[in-house]
Amino acid sequence: MTAPAIELKGISKSFGPVQANKDIAIRVMPGTIHGIIGENGAGKSTLMSILYGFYKADTGEIFIRGERTEIPDSQAAIRAGIGMVFQHFKLVQNFTVLENIVLGAEDGALLKGSLSKARTLLKQLSEEYELHVDPDAKIEDLGVGMQQRVEILKALYRRADILILDEPTGVLTPAEADHLFRILEGLKREGKTIILITHKLREIMETTDTVSVMRRGEMTATVKTAETTPQELAELMVGREVLLRVDKQAATPGETVLNVENLQVVDGSGVERLRGISLNVKRGEILGICGVAGNGQSELLEVLGGMRPGKGRVTVNGQELDLTGAESDARTRRRRGIAHVPEDRQEEGLIMDFFAWENVAFGYHDDARYQRGAMMNNDAIREDAEAKIAKFDVRPANCWLKAKNFSGGNQQKIVIARELERNPDLLLVGQPTRGVDIGAIEFIHEQIVALRDAGKAVLLVSVELDEILSLSDRIAVIFDGRIMGERLPSETDERELGLLMAGITDTDKDHSVDEIEENLAHATGKAG
């Protein structure tokens, strides 16, 4: 019998009292695409970090191509033929493609020979695996799809025949994602072994040969992909039946809550991030903004949320917002009935070293319920936090746990609980389910729809087209700081939205991935 490309036996890893992996056993056969799925905190990242040498297992053994192998660090993993493409790319932005590929794999102190050798091999690899990229282009001038190709080429240059990809399509357009999976199929045909970590069940079903499911640190099942369904996989992940679609009634929009006219933003480097944005959101509706990261959607949320200045005219409930003066801050926005779930929960939504109960109160310290004369009423804050933690099913249900000790999905629940429970007139929500597992996604979507059904206005920003199409009542597409058009979810599809996201308005024509990449690089690469 052919030996597995990878076999893990009895892998366990604890961090203090938390057991991240418990007696994990998994076999990945050569020349296959093997998916690994699980909820946040299920132990997927820890397991892959052990395989790639970032962590050392407390117990257990690793076998590579049938041989027991010690992997104390990432260099040992590379020597064993393992490469990893991270969700957040590990590239030096002001280096060229060629320099990034050689970095850490130089043949000696003099770089000329290494660069010449790398150029020859890079051309060969690019042609063999359809990973065409200009070796002399700087990373900062490339779109995210091209940068991902560079990461794959880095691994192949180091002779990896086992590739681990962590959430590889999070920032790609549908066309770029399709191209990536064609590349992975080509790698598989050449005998490469691929481990794909993703929370997108459709990608698992369309791409993998085998899928393993993790729950609470244990491996609960490994099945042939052709012999299972998305519903079965979701239930294995969560341990209960999960609704894989957004259950909502048709919207009944009321009067306009948010009106934006000719909104412009120029950043500190003089780059124009918003170029005359105009839009509106009504009571009882969700307006979804979709676009590839870096095209202005972050700046839109920041201006509306009081985090950066802008020019133009913005009204909420008919009253104009201050965009540059003394009342343009986030506190004033909250007093005007605007709640904001920021895109980056760790940098903008939470203070990671503070307790959960403290994070639940951030931004709302002047709430009368939190006051005791001239002092803060910490008992009242903790009581309120415990109620929110229970209602939003934050796990563990411990308000004395620091934010950094919760999984990403539970961190997101803390932020959403804090903002939604304020009964805002307008909710600004950025990437509500980024890095969040199936069960938590279902819950978060339910809460957003419930707010809409209560007659509130919701402005949703997401790079997930499935989320945009299923949650939104109207969709606006943003590219290079401009609104490319509006669509109704029932009258569009991922292909049309994907082309608009790449700045292509003639969506009835066929367009190559290279054309899409070129447009995206122009819009996002020049701005970093």
Image (cartoon, rainbow, N blue to C red):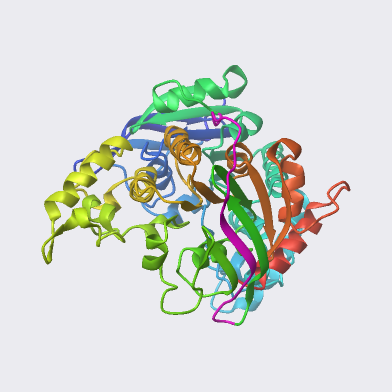
**Image coords of residue 269 (percent x, y):** 57, 82
Q: Residue at x 65, y 55 (%)?
A: 291
- In-image side of 170 versus 397 (left or right): right
| Closer to the camera in the image, 270 or 519 | 270
Residue 173 located left or right of residue 162: right
Residue 300: percent from the left, percent from the top? 56, 64
Residue 179 drawn above or below residue 142 = above
Residue 320 visible from this viewpoint: yes
Task: Judge whether 76 appears above or below 519 on screen.
Answer: above
Position of 163 compared to 135: left or right? Answer: left
Please check the rendered image and state whether residue 414 is part of the magenta-colored stretch, yes or no.
no
Q: Is residue 325 above or below residue 498?
A: below
**Location of residue 26 in the rendering, given as x and y in whole percent from the top left corner:** 44, 29
Whether the magenta-drawn stretch holds residue 259 is answered as yes
| Residue shown at the point (57%, 66%) measured from the top left | 314
Q: Residue 258, position in %: x, y?
A: 56, 57
Residue 249: quadrant of the picture: top right
Seen at 54% across and 42% down, the residue is 284
Which residue of the protein is positioned furthest toward the right in this rendering? 509
- Where 113 sits versus 449, above or below? below
Front one among 400 and 12: 400
In terms of image quadrants, where is residue 213? top left
Work out which quarter of the rendered image holds the N terminus and state it.
top right
Magenta extent: 245-269
Which quadrant of the rendered structure holds the C terminus? bottom right
Residue 97 seen in the current view: no
